[in-house]
Image (cartoon, rainbow, N blue to C red):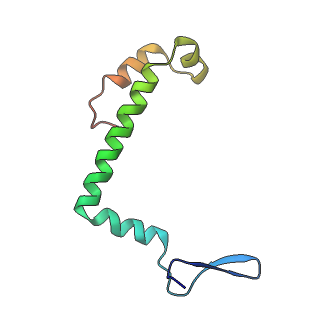
Amino acid sequence: MRPTDVTRSSGLYTAAPGAVPAADRVARVTRRPLWRLLDVLFSVMERRKQRHALMGLDDHLLKDIGVSRSEVEQEVSKPFWRG
């Protein structure tokens, strides 16, 4: 069994002996500079995509989600590095 496999014991799922918790695996990956850079790059790309999708909504849909056109314009005008 691989260290990340999960076993079933009496109806509950438990981690196999020696398994590394997911949070630890994620923490190790984010410490690597290349992975951190890629994570930032993908976050920036996703933020850009979401802002452009927001800009494409009509006023009726914006009203449904409780956002005004001026708030959308303010969000879209932010630099890519600002969340």
- What residue do we see at 33% from left, 39% from top? 45
Q: Is residue 32 above or below residue 13?
A: above
Q: Is residue 75 above or below residue 35?
A: above
How far across and how far down the image is residue 28, in percent? 34, 70
Tally of numbered tags = 0
Residue 30 x, y percent position in the rendering: 32, 62
Quadrant of the image containing the C terminus: top left
Pick whichever, 63 or 7, lies toward us.
Answer: 7
Q: As drawn, is 3 to the left or to the right of 60?
A: left
Residue 35 falls left or right of residue 69: left
Position above or below: 40 against 36? above
**Quarter of the image containing the N terminus?**
bottom right
Place of residue 55 in the rendered image (x, y in percent of width and height, measured from the top left): 42, 20
Q: Which residue lies most toward the front here? A: 1
Q: Residue at x 29, y 52 (%)?
A: 38
Q: Residue at x 57, y 83 (%)?
A: 16
For image coordinates 25% across by 53% down, the residue present is 37
